[in-house]
Amino acid sequence: SCKLLGAAPIPKKIDHIYAGSPQEHENDCVVYGKVQLLGNDMGGQVPSDHYGLLANLEIKMTNKIKHQQKLLENAFSSTALPSPDTLLALTIHSPCMERLKEQFDSASSYRLPHLTLLHGFIDVSTNTDNLTSAAVEGAVKELFELLPTEGLLRIKFNTDSLQVFEHQSSASVVAVPQDEHDGLSILHTLYDALRTKFKLCDEQETRSTYGWRPHVNLGKFGSTTMARSTMVQWAENGLWEDQEVVVRSIDMLRRGHDGNFRFVASTPLGRSFNPSSSINGALKDAGASFSANMDMFAQLIFSHLSRMCKFLTKANDQIETSFHLVGSTQLNVALPSISDVDGVVVLRCIDQRASIKTMAEFQNQFEQLISEYYPKARMRTRVARNIKIWTVKLFPKFPPVDIMCSICNHEGTPIDSVSKEVYSAIDDAKYIMNYIESSLTGLFGGDENDNDLLNAFKGGLRIVKLWALHRGIYGAPMGYLGGGGWAILMARTLHSFDHKRMDCFVHEISSCTSTRDRSLVLVRHFFDQAAQWPWPSPVALGEVPDHLHEQARIGQKMIVLAPCSNGDLGRNSTRSTTLATAEELRIMGDQMRSQMPDEVLEQQLQFSSLSTFISMFPMIASVSFHLCEEERVQRETSSDSLLDIYLQAPCHTRSPRLVELKGWASNRVLGLVISLERGGGGGGG
């Protein structure tokens, strides 16, 4: 939608709006839809001196509009004026450089070690941020077409990297990267690609007779002699060390009112990946490319939040703060649009008596730091099971991260049950992987490579999670198991083999030559074993307390225990969702035994978009959904459902988004049904 205003002296008066004729522009991108007349009385405001028209237009991405979008980007890059208050840079994560810069360049307007790409850069405003981000992403894509398949930017620094840059009345000690890869200057290639996108941002190359020279400022001094003397001392005293730095993003920063730069956007340095367009390729690499995409963002989030924790530690000498990734990202099985990024902040209090006060201060300081350094970040808090959770979205295109906090005493021991449960989440993923490694090593007697077996389990778990999502039985909010629950269930089934099945499993794995094939073997045996699980018996990787067996028998719902935190990952399940999960596992087990696993999984995962597979809810409270495109809804008398939901489209209209409406409505109604069932005792607790 757009807001049209006329010129002064009548700014609310809309006069002439022109549109091309569809007959003259039949290949254009605008499809003319339903048009209706508006009355001339708009609440006392006259939109024009003639009757207005309200036109519904549908926009299609044709080749012509893509070409026009490219022209728009080119016009933007040629006319957008640079601003000294905006910076495009590579932030360098190096403890060595951070220490030196903090001591010898503390007056810098950007306190972190960084390699400036464009300054001044385009003023990233509300009207230009999308075009700016698209242009930077285009430059990154051009760069990675020339780089190895790894998709990471590695920059090396050695003793020869330290140099002195002379200025009119001062001098700087800088670190110049070793910028060669198979004869290619990587940083100059990136810079040239960016300069093509931002033609007027030439300040960095015009300020020196040598053009743009990539470097990291580490210290500023009053004279060249002092700079050279300090540089020699760094080398002699071991303050400088050779290193290889992995750079994960191009950061856009804007100067604040205090003169210091803040993050406003971040573009990952990695190969672009669109999960919705690649959903059918999940079996090609056992979902590894899916997880690599999530891991790219998770590592960026880890870098940013770890830095905030360091700032908090420096600001308060009573605590030590650290940030840890947990859950699916820690297991390397996170999937776009399915998994969350989860993290734990550990506060080690030097003075235990001040722990409660320190925690309250930390919460305020943490929120203030996020707001200060990330002005575009969004943050909200909620409480679940007495645990306070921050949900933080640092940048618009980043996935949100859920952050929990654990307070520990000076020995590193959690001070209460809540902190203990949160802290144990760090160890859950490690325990699961150790459990898998010991189980598989026990089966194979050390004949197989441990990494190959672990990667096969990760690939199998990704496939099982995608299958569960496609079958509509994934996600704790909907009463099903989330990623952690499926991981524990899959790990537990490795201890369920009888001797005959175990021999067959070992033989099949040993004959595989790729991670993908091993993953498919694991998936087939998982469904074979999980189909026979005696629900609602609890699932755990250790001993199950007797009272949980009784609780499961009475409640008739899933109980899946986390190995270290002992949290119940099936706590949101109900009797209906437990039955639905068991039935889907039984059906899949039968299909796997009668057909080739590749064929079965390809059928299950053969969907072009997420909206097309939210149509299979076989067991939940016997709810049926019907799409109707008639003016009168005809009830299906043959329906045996307990609850029938009818979705009626507008008369004489076939909406292409009707299936998406069904998926949306299904989720909302099923959520209501599950809440009612849980409230009525069907949740077993």
Image (spheres, rainbow, N blue to C red):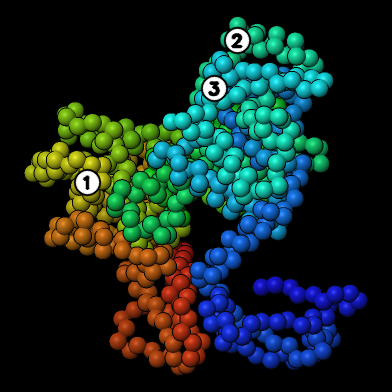
Q: Residue at x 37, y 65 (%)?
A: 608
**Residue 190 percent coordinates (x, y):** 56, 40
Q: Amino acid at mark 3?
A: Phe
Who is closer to the viewer here, 424 or 108?
A: 108
Q: Residue at x 70, y 82 (%)?
A: 18
- Front in this rendered view, residue 578 or 232: 232
Q: Is residue 409 above or below residue 404?
A: above
Q: Which residue is mark 3?
A: 157
Marks 1/2: CA–CA distance:
51 Å
Tell me the CA gap for discs 3 and 2. 13 Å
Residue lying at 69% horizontally and 87% vertically, measured from the top left: 53
- Compared across the picture, whether 22 is left or right of 444 comes to right
Identify which residue, 648 or 147, lies in the foreground: 147
User: Which tag is nearer the camera, tag 1 or tag 2?
Assistant: 2
Picture quadrant of residue 159: top right
**Amino acid type of the residue that numbered disc 2 sits on in the rendered structure:** Ala
Amino acid marked by disc 1: Asp
Q: Position of residue 12 (x, y in %)?
A: 83, 77
> Residue tagged by mark 2?
235
Mark number displayed over residue 517: 1
